[in-house]
Every structure is written in structure tokens, then in C-alpha cells.
Image: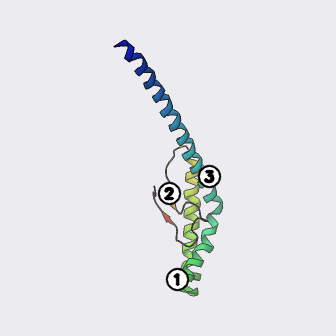
């Protein structure tokens, strides 16, 4: 019994350390991604204004784009900047992106949406 117990204990300890080191790397990666996306969203949040004017004008015409598009752009500018700041402050808690698309330049032709998109 002791001949099997010692190797099994050694394997169990190695597996424990290996899984923890893998978890630490994924934690660091997820935290880093959240910090970078938060910082980029704070800096590029102002680009939501022209993005929403372009989208609204494309689908509904110039008068709509210059009124509703501007209002929507201001709303999304504030939203992306605030969410980015919150992600930057809480980067130590690795979560999925709170904004879709996570970066403004990823899909410039779709309207921004908020919530948990895992």
C-alpha cells in the first residue's frame, strides 16, 4: 500500500501546483486584457460621437443623423468612457467585456451595446 501511496501523493501534489500556475497565468492574462480595454475605452470613448452620427445618417438620413445621431453619440461617449474607467479601476477582478464591441475600432459599423458579453 505504501509503495503506491507515495507516487500517487507526489502526482497529486504536482497536479495541484500545475493547475495553480495555469490559473495564475489566465488570471494575469484576463486582468491585463481588462486593464488594456479599460484604458483604450477611456481614451477612445469620444470616437462614439462621429461613429453614431455616421451610423444614423447611413440608415435614416442626414436630419436624423444630425439630431438623434448626435444625442446617441453623446450618450455612448459617456457610456464607453465611464465603463472603461470602471474596467480600469477594477481590472484586478477579471471579467468578460462589458461593452460590445470591446474596442471601438473592432466593428465601427455596429451600434455599441452594454452588458455582460462572455
Distance between mark 3 and mark 1 Cα atoms? 32 Å
Say which of 72 and 47 sits in front.
47
Q: At 51% from the left edge and 46% from the top edge, which residue is drawn?
A: 94
The residue at which mark 2 appears reads as 98
Say which of 9 and 60 sits in front.
9
Q: At 46% from the left edge and 29% from the top edge, which residue is drawn?
A: 15
Q: Secondary structure at mark 3?
A: helix
Return the x and y of residue 77 as percentages of the image width and height. Answer: 59, 66
Left or right of 63 on screen, residue 15: left
The residue at which mark 1 appears reads as 59
Return the x and y of residue 34 as percentages of the image width and height. Answer: 56, 50
Say which of 56 and 27 sits in front.
27
In the displayed structure, 100 sits above or below 26; it is below
* Quadrant of the frame with the N terminus: top left
Instruction: Residue 36: give its label.
Output: 3
Closer to the N terminus: mark 2 or mark 3? 3
Q: At 56% from the left edge and 82% from the top edge, which residue is drawn?
A: 58
Distance between mark 2 and mark 1 Cα atoms? 26 Å
Q: Secondary structure at mark 2?
A: loop
Return the x and y of residue 113 as percentages of the image width and height. Answer: 49, 65
Amino acid at each position: 500500500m505504501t509503495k503506491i501511496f507515495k507516487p500517487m501523493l507526489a502526482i497529486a501534489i504536482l497536479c495541484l501546483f500545475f493547475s495553480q500556475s495555469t490559473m495564475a497565468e489566465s488570471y494575469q492574462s484576463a486582468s491585463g486584457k481588462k486593464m488594456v480595454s479599460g484604458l483604450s475605452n477611456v481614451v477612445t470613448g469620444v470616437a462614439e460621437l462621429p461613429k453614431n452620427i455616421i451610423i444614423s445618417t447611413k440608415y435614416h438620413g442626414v436630419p436624423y443623423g444630425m439630431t438623434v445621431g448626435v444625442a446617441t453619440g453623446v450618450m455612448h461617449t459617456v457610456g464607453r468612457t465611464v465603463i472603461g474607467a470602471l474596467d480600469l479601476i477594477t481590472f484586478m477582478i477579471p471579467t468578460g467585456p462589458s461593452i460590445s464591441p470591446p474596442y471601438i475600432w473592432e466593428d465601427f459599423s455596429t451600434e455599441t451595446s452594454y452588458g455582460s458579453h462572455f
